[in-house]
Amino acid sequence: YRYYKLTHQFGNVPFLDREYTGPKLDFYSYDRWSILEQLKKDLEFAYQWVPEKVDRGRTSKAACGVLLMKVSMCLGEFDRAIEVGKEIVANHPLMVSRFTSNKEKPNTNLMHDLHSVEAKMDMSNTEGLMYVVSYQDVEGRDRIQSMRNATPYWAKGAAIVTPDGQSGTAISPAAADKETEIDNDFHVGRGIGCCRPNNFLQYGIWGEKEKNDLRSPNGLGSWRRMEDLYYNAPGLKGKSEWYGKHLVRPVNMSISDSVRCWFSWPHYKIFVPDPTKNTDRSGGETPWYIYRSAEVYLLMGECYYWKGQAQEAADMLNVVRKRAGAEPLLASDINIGEVLAERARELYYEENRHVELVRIAYTFAKTGKPCEVFGGRVYKLDTFSGPGGTGSNVKEAGYNFWYDWLMKVNNFFHDGTEVANGKYRISVHHVLWPVPYNAIKTNTGGVINQNIGYSGAEDNITPLKVGEEAPVK
């Protein structure tokens, strides 16, 4: 699990196949492809022997299978990934009917059930394949903080003001109005807007075919808008006509404030009540999905895309779409953009988006498959991070899919949005992260490579392959 991430965050990295209990200063970078080949061998073994039924939070056979699918896809073994995926969903069908106590609540739907704390604890939930767990009053517990991070900073007094310029919101309304309709903290949590969705997620992926999609802003109670919240600052009560009324976007709100303070969000996904807190609710203890069957269908659909089987790809994506109430895709709709849009609709705040985009970028470069989203553009592995050398900090299309895709759909990078602390900017080589300087310099007996585009890459050597012995210095 960690190496799958590392090979997409950093590329070539040191490879450890055992636990080291003493100091070691002679690490070498290993070729990411050879690491992935070793991961596949290990995962094939795990998929055969890890039990299917385990305590929630432990690794199951199906969880090993999902990771085996992803690694197989990295290596171009799409048929193996499909084979494993079919086995997983045969044993772990999607939840297609309402199944928790939430079904009695007004303005809720199946998506609220699926992503509620109750659903993730419910042993009848066949869809969850791997979880991280946290329960109240259990050692090692921690709050999820999802509402704090993914909900707008609606309590920022200088930004959220009434139409006549008064500070409009507060974490706690007047005492008599606690836990009533106008108590924003009680109903959505106290956010600070650190994980804001871009326009692609808020608007771009919800078209005519998603007009009845339960995951969309059109879904019954699924999303929240700022206009759903209320002016509730205690100082307004009895003094302002705006107390208890819905928010109105401030006319002169700055771009910087709007980035954190004014956007829509998928409430059904990130709302986690915290019964231990009476105010300043950030998100309580809960299990959280790492893998579930819906992603398996999306991975199989992507495999069929890489294989050029558009109808089969549509069929897989449509299983997930049908459950959500979206209209089916046609074979003619299928391209990598639609695959990524469906992942965004289904897996917001679950998938590691950067990792999956880099995986896809590597696959384009490895297979040479023309990218129809960019007019048949073909990518290459030898220039994946750009040209390298002194002119490596480039902002030009055509080097890797990751950069091209973000510049196409991410309005912050595309527009170069400026906020209080800087400006949104990326370059081609940011597809991979910089290896920490301290890790390289303190490794005095070996060589850990830096990624192309970052200072120190000029000292790189050819990475080892798994199984090769490190040189003696």
Image (spheres, helix red, strand yellow):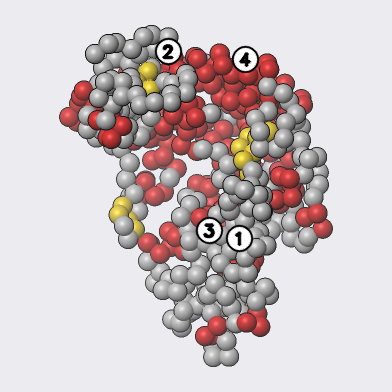
The spot of residue 78 in percent (x, y) is: 58, 17
Circle nearer the viewer, 3 or 4: 4
Residue placed under numbered mark 3 in the picture: 148
* Label 2 SS: loop
Which of pointers 1 and 4 lies earlier in the amino acid sequence?
A: 4
Against 4, residue 205 (above or below) is below
Is label 1 in contact with label 2 (beta carbons under 8 Å)?
no
Residue placed under numbered mark 4 in the picture: 45
The spot of residue 32 in percent (x, y) is: 41, 20
Residue placed under numbered mark 1 in the picture: 224
Residue 14 at least partly seen: yes
Mark 1: amino acid: Arg
Mark 4: amino acid: Phe
- Determine the CA span between mark 3 and mark 4: 40 Å
Q: Quadrant of residue 319?
A: top right
Q: Residue furthest bottom?
A: 239
- Determine the CA span between mark 1 and mark 4: 45 Å
Mark number, residue 343: none
Residue at 77 percent of width and 44 percent of height: 122
The spot of residue 4 in percent (x, y) is: 49, 26
Mark 2: amino acid: Val
Which of pointers 3 and 1 lies earlier in the amino acid sequence?
A: 3
- Determine the CA span between mark 2 and mark 4: 18 Å
Which of pointers 3 and 2 lies earlier in the amino acid sequence?
A: 3
* Label 1 SS: loop
Mark 3: amino acid: Arg
Residue at 49 percent of width and 30 percent of height: 2
